[in-house]
Image (cartoon, grey):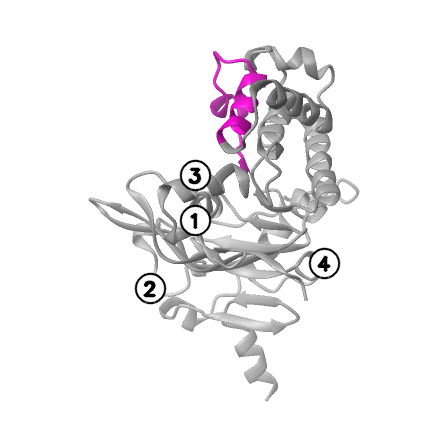
Amino acid sequence: MDEMLLEIKHLKSYFFTRRGISPAVDDVSLQVPKGKIVGIVGESGCGKSMTAKSVMDLLKYPGRVAGGEILLEGRDLTKLSEKEKRKVRGEDISMIFQEPMTSLNPVVKVGKQVREAILNHQKMDKAEAKKRVIEVFRQVGISEPEKRYECYPHELSGGLRQRVMIAMAMVCRPKLMIADEPTTALDVTIEAQILKLIKNLCDTTGMSCLLISHNLGVIAQMCDYVYVMYAGKVVEQGDVFTLFDHPQHPYTKGLLASIIHLDELPERLSTIPGVVPNLMHLPEGCAFCSRCSEAMECCKTKKPELHDLGNGHVIRCFLPAEREAAHE
């Protein structure tokens, strides 16, 4: 039995606007074991990044965590003071964002920005902190780390900027790294290098990682366990082999069918019709019903609950119950 580092229980993160309430994350529960990489996958607007920002307490007004628990080694982060939350961010949990140019200060040298992360969280003088930054730069594969320390963000390539962000996330030796689409802005070659780096860091340091992506190929390559999200809810979860070899939810099947295999190019590309529904105007029944090729009458009026298929494989769908009834 894996020891859990992060446990999210029935998390609800809503946006309270004048036009209504948008349930960006609605009753989401997930677990990240120690030393494992757990993935969250789904289309844009499904609640992946909002889940990550909820953990980091980075939701901006009018969004806020409206319910549930976020437990880090049994400690509920939602009940901490602002000072305690700042201590957790950086020391225990760090985050890598999609685009480093929007996260790095353009007028401050990258070395000083990473050094600042150390000085904010650890008792260390500037000289020691600089040594630590150069050591971590070397660890994340930045060549000539002493020279790069003195560079501004615009003087570095996209791949090097993302390595700087990983160094900033790693510099205080966190227990959990949250990587939110860390390779979106990179070309395929650099993407592979960054993913390999993250995996190696997890393997060598024992750190856990919550990896958020819309790319199923990345999830398959990196993760031990996967959660599929749709319209703010988890619709399927399981270990990576079970989920990719035996997907059960029509949404997961649709995502997997849309992957292009170069050795067997189809005459027509597979797509999921329609778009993710407006969260302020969700349908009465299943949120995926209007896009689902296997929808039944009950899907139009009833919301499905999670159904345990065994061995940690869980889906939010009426189909398993219908199949069981058909076999009786």
Q: Which numbered disc, 4 or 2, marks the residue that appears first in the sequence?
A: 4
Residue at 70% x, 28% y is: 140
Q: What is the number of the mark on residue 276?
A: 1
- Image coordinates for residue 236, horizontal then vertical, percent: 56, 61
Of the image marks 2 and 1, the number of the one nearer the N terminus: 1
Question: Disc 2 on helix, strand or loop?
Answer: loop
Callout 4 amino acid: Phe
How many residues crowd around disc 2 within 10 Å: few (fewer than 14), some, or many (20 or more)? Answer: few
Give the number of the mark in front: 4 or 1: 4
Quadrant where the C terminus is found in the figure: bottom right
Tag 4 near tag 2, CB within 8 Å = no
Amino acid on which disc 1 is placed = Val
Q: Secondary structure at mark 1?
A: loop
Mark number, residue 86? 3
Residue type at tag 3: Arg
Q: Nearer the viewer, residue 137 or 115?
A: 115
Range shown magenta? 94-120
**Which one is earlier in the sequence, the residue at label 4 or at label 3?**
3
Write down the residue under mark 4. 241
Q: Secondary structure at mark 4?
A: helix
Whether residue 222 is in magenta: the answer is: no
- Measure how far apart labels 4 and 2 are at the Cα level: 33 Å
The type of residue carrying mark 2 is: Glu
Choose mark 4 or mark 3, whichever is in front.
3
